[in-house]
Amino acid sequence: MTPKLAETDQGDPLSKSRLRLWLRLLKTSGLIEEELRRRMRAELGTTLPRFDVMSALARTPEGLKMSEISRRLRVSNGNITGIVDKLTEEGIALRVAVPDDRRANLVRLTPKGQAVFAEHASRHEAWIDEILTGLNADDVAGVGEGADPLSDTLEEG
């Protein structure tokens, strides 16, 4: 015997509603990310992954090991290595040896990197504000409140 699916008020199975919600969230997220990637490349001459690495480093001024960057951004060490190599070549980041571990380095933003990131972060925030301009304060609060329990559950699991 199959367990009975929870029903919505309209008699539609709740699981189908959740699936439709997931697809809408996925589509919306993809469209926003696509627009951010386009603007970063066109207006800043950079990429979203580079921005993400700089963002992680900006939030941790003492520096992060490569594995920590990978874990935070949920990407492979190989992806991070190439980005950090380029940021280092450009004087945006630097590698600092970890005293007790000859194999490990901490990656930090340089003062130049901090300035570059500050400019990029400001532009990023303005773009997000523009992209989401159709949402009023109640919409933003409602979506945020709805997403929080889901995020909490997923992070715990």
Image: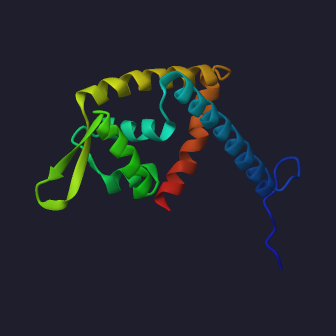
Rendered image coloring scheme: rainbow
Q: Residue furthest front?
A: 89
Q: Name which residue lies at 81% across and 68% down.
A: 4
Is 132 above or below relative to 47? Answer: above
Is 74 above or below relative to 53? Answer: below
Q: Name which residue lies at 47% across and 41% down.
A: 49
Q: Residue furthest right?
A: 11
Q: Picture quarter containing residue 110?
A: top left
Is 125 above or below relative to 3? Answer: above
Q: Residue furthest bottom?
A: 1
Residue 100 as seen in the image, left or right of residue 52: left
Image position, residue 57 (x, y; %): 32, 40
Image position, residue 141 (x, y; %): 58, 30
| Residue nearest the observer in this picture, 108 or 58 | 108
Residue 95 as seen in the image, left or right of residue 47: left
Q: Residue furthest left?
A: 99
Q: Name which residue lies at 15% across and 61% down.
A: 101
Q: Name which residue lies at 26% across and 45% down.
A: 107
Q: Picture quarter containing residue 50?
A: top left
Total tally of numbered discs in the picture: 0
Res 132 seen here: no
Image position, residue 130 (x, y; %): 60, 19
Res 110 seen here: yes
Residue 16 as seen in the image, left or right of residue 60: right
Quarter occupied by the N terminus: bottom right
| Residue nearest the observer in this picture, 154 or 6 | 154
Image position, residue 90 (x, y; %): 32, 33
Residue 30 as seen in the image, left or right of residue 42: right
